[in-house]
Amino acid sequence: MTRLGLGLAAVGRPAYLTAARSAELGDDRSVAALRARTAELLDAAYAAGVRYVDAARSYGRAEEFLAAWRASRPDVTDLIVASKWGYTYVGDWRTDRRVHEVKDHSVQAFRRQWAETRALLGDTVAVYQIHSVTPESPALDDAELLGELARLRDTGVRVGVSTSGPAQADSVRRALGVVVGGAPLFSVVQSTWNVLEPSVGPALAEAADAGVAVVLKECLANGRLAATEPDGTPGVARAADVAKRLGLPLDEFAMAVALAQPWAGRVLTGAVTTDQIARNRRAAEAGILPADAAAQLADLAEAPADYWATRSRREWR
């Protein structure tokens, strides 16, 4: 097995903000086409040793596609299924919608979305996370919501948070301090971490030291760190130079660096092709980076505010 996990954000709905989608997915974004693509990816990932799959209520039909695949593979009994609530998909299966998801961290949204997740995935859900917690989110201060999450925790489901935005470290540390019923509430944290935006790293190391499972997402910076569509920004150009000096393709270098973080329990791939899964697996097998790699990474990071501003300008396509 591998520490890689498969994230379904890019294949559960017809539009997403990852680069090069048109070339990778083609023009057919029908429900049937993406259901088939998801099944193909799950087969390839499972064969490659992936046992962790990440979905969310806002990923279009990702949970539905995952449920259909599981039903077709009764021999698969060792998959760890993670999902998230807090965003509602409103894209109406179109690529030209101005808004594709709406955020709501209320207790009412949790009740509705947990029921929807359970209806599709039953008791296979091992991890359920608040989607995209930021310092402005009311979720970590809502006593009623935290009580309901604690009751879910007490049934054996691991309750977690995912984070986004330039203040991810603040969100992680706040989540670590939430105690309900005499026990920490959150046992999983999923954060964006890559060589362009590593600012949450120290907080994630603290989480791992506290026994919290750390999951990394967007390790290729939504395609910016993939060789298919370099964006010409200084950070990406420097990363490409470092990867070349190390003898690695840019995407494999970026994944290898994420996997080299000792506090990272799982590293998600957002692959949309089986070739990408194979490339990510090669990165996982690359082993420890050269001793001088850390020094070469120091000047790759962008200012967090700049990184997230760039991300917010990406088009869904």
Image (cartoon, helix red, strand yellow):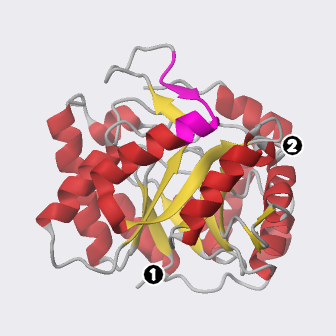
Q: CA distance from mark 1 to mark 2?
A: 31 Å
Residue 270: x and y in percent read 45, 53
* Identity of the residue drawn at 57% across and 70% down: 154
Q: Nearer the viewer, residue 213 or 23?
A: 213
Quarter assignment of residue 107: top right
* Identity of the residue drawn at 79% across and 73% down: 182
Residue 149: x and y in percent read 62, 56
User: Considering the numbered disc 2 on the image, is that residue within a helix, a strand or a loop?
Assistant: loop
* Identity of the residue drawn at 26% across and 77% down: 47
Three-letter amino acid code of the residue under disc 1? Thr
Three-letter amino acid code of the residue under disc 2? Ala
Residue 236: x and y in percent read 69, 47
Classify 10 Å Cα crowding around label 2: few (below 14), some (14-19), many (20 and above): some
Q: In which quadrant is the N terminus drawn?
A: bottom left
Asked whether residue 7 is in view, the answer is: yes
Classify 10 Å Cα crowding around label 1: few (below 14), some (14-19), many (20 and above): some
- As drawn, is 85 to the left or to the right of 26? right
Quarter assignment of residue 190: bottom right
User: Considering the numbered disc 1 on the image, is that residue within a helix, a strand or a loop?
Assistant: loop
Instruction: Report if residue 4 lies within the magenta region.
Output: no
Magenta span covers which residues? Answer: 99-110
Quarter assignment of residue 298: bottom right
Q: Which residue is mark 1?
A: 2
Q: Nearer the viewer, mark 1 or mark 2?
A: 1
Asked whether residue 244 is in view, the answer is: no
- As drawn, is 93 to the left or to the right of 139? left
Residue 10: x and y in percent read 41, 43
Q: Which mark is residue 303?
A: 2
Ranked by sequence position, the earlier of labels 1 and 2 is 1
Q: In which quadrant is the C terminus drawn?
A: top left
Instruction: Report if residue 103 lies within the magenta region.
Output: yes
Q: Which mark is residue 246?
A: none
